[in-house]
Amino acid sequence: MNAKRLFTALLAALMLFAAGCVKDPVNVNTDPTAVPTTAPTEAPKVEVKDMLAAAPAVREYVKHPNSLYPNVDYNDREAWKAYWDQEDLWYQALAARREEGKKVTSLSVFTGLMTTELVRENPNKNVVWSPMNVYIALAMLAETTAGETRKQILTLLGSSDMEAIRANVIALMNAESNDDGVSASLLANSLWLNRRWSFYEDTLKLLANSYSASSYWGDPGDPAFTLALRQWLNDNTGGLLKDAVDNVRLDADTVLAIASTLYFKAAWENEFNKERTSTETFHAPSGDIKTDFMHGTIGSMESLYYQGESFTAVRQGLKSEANSVWYLLPNEGVSIAEMLEKEGLAFINSDKSMAEDGYIVNITVPKLDVSSEFELKKTLMALGMTDCFDYTTADFTPLSPDPDMLYVSSVTHAARVKTDEEGVEAAAFTVIDVKCGAAPVEHPIVEFVLDRPFVMVITGASGQPMFIVVVNTPVE
């Protein structure tokens, strides 16, 4: 069945009830006990691929020479030529990604506002989130809305122009997508559509073309549909967020779920020596704790050192070369909230020229395994994005010919960041649930000891923050 016939068939099957929600005229069941009230636990009989209606083309990545030729014989000239040829291709791909990253207009306003608000709402707690992941999910939501509803979303995202936001996302997807066998930076988007509802084909095509969003059709009231969404989330976050994924659920009132994921893994440019790892004291807001600290030296060619009015920052390189890790340590007596309100994080992308190189940095940093799970509705409303959460004001006219009573019931975000002597692994997902109803030169040496609350930022090829970690306790 082609797309137009599919939409025609869906339209013919709809029934509009007095409550304003479209239901299946054949399978309506008014018995509330017939709707699962607990999360399904068994594997779905129908797999994710069986619900797939449309999928973007699979991206192809240029492999890193070290992944194709891990053990080249020093005397094998042909093997070395193949290695160098592959290295040239890989650097060309890296250069192309960086050029795409230059097209991204700064996300610093959105990143700063959200980080400051999340820290304010969660005093003295770890805050782990992905500005890039939430930005893309909200941009997809904006595509399905209009009027004041869309305006509020775009204002928070830092633009009044939907085309500019769309171009930003396309550039981010092109710049940050990578799986070269040595490091991985993978972004994925999907739409989970209630098969009883009618949707505008043009909007779904736009989300597929500009956001590489796969579309899945099914019955949100069927536990198999929730399990299929969970399987998709786990598959695209490396299983790193399984506990948070298990809390995701859809129900019969769901009209559309927007899902976005980001997975990242890379090794340090210079790994930490495990023999130097030692148990030391971290001065957490709740009191001193003992945890494992890694000790290393960042050479003068790899480090960037920045000193603001209220904090000091150091950049550490990764073997992916497109990515970096920034550590921001507030000055003694300055809280992370005060630091963010006073200076923010804008220097990481827009003011890199202010950072200095040529320093040798002896760094001491705790090993991390930190995560957060947020319902972002309160945060987004505090920042002015209110209309989409109220069915009396939400405008979903670009999404469906039956937009009345549609509203966003929840915006779930989860993220986790792990570090050890070898490198960094991180993942994030965002699920937006749309429902129907009421709702050899001498260099200066810097001692950089992160033994009190600090901020860690992982940046991408675009220079934009992929993950932000406010560390009040290094291991949970």
Image (tube, rainbow, N blue to C red):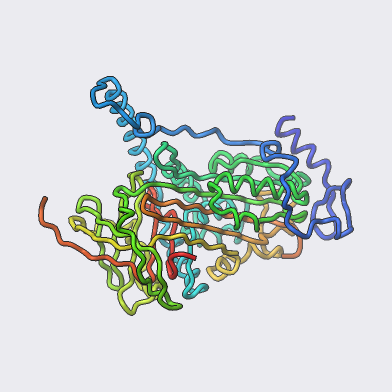
Report the residue at 44% width, 46% height from top. Answer: 172
Q: Residue furthest top?
A: 78
Q: Quadrant of residue 33?
A: bottom right
User: In the displayed structure, does residue 176 sit left or right of residue 10?
Assistant: left
Front residue of 327 and 450: 450
User: In the displayed structure, does residue 227 sit left or right of residue 10?
Assistant: left
The number of discs equals 0
Q: Residue furthest front?
A: 275
Q: Quadrant of the N terminus?
A: top right
**Residue 194, image x, y percentages:** 74, 47
**Residue 474, image x, y percentages:** 43, 65
Front residue of 135 and 373: 373
Report the residue at 42% width, 73% height from top. Answer: 289
**Residue 390, image x, y percentages:** 68, 65
**Residue 357, image x, y percentages:** 20, 56
Does residue 329 appear in the picture of this structure?
yes
Asked if residue 74 is positioned above or below residue 10 in the image, the reply reads: above
User: In the displayed structure, does residue 68 sit left or right of residue 363?
Assistant: right
Report the residue at 55% width, 71% height from top. Answer: 382
Asked if residue 67 is positioned above or below residue 82 in the image, the reply reads: below
Does residue 351 appear in the picture of this structure?
no
Q: Quadrant of residue 87?
A: top left
Report the residue at 53% width, 68% height from top. Answer: 383
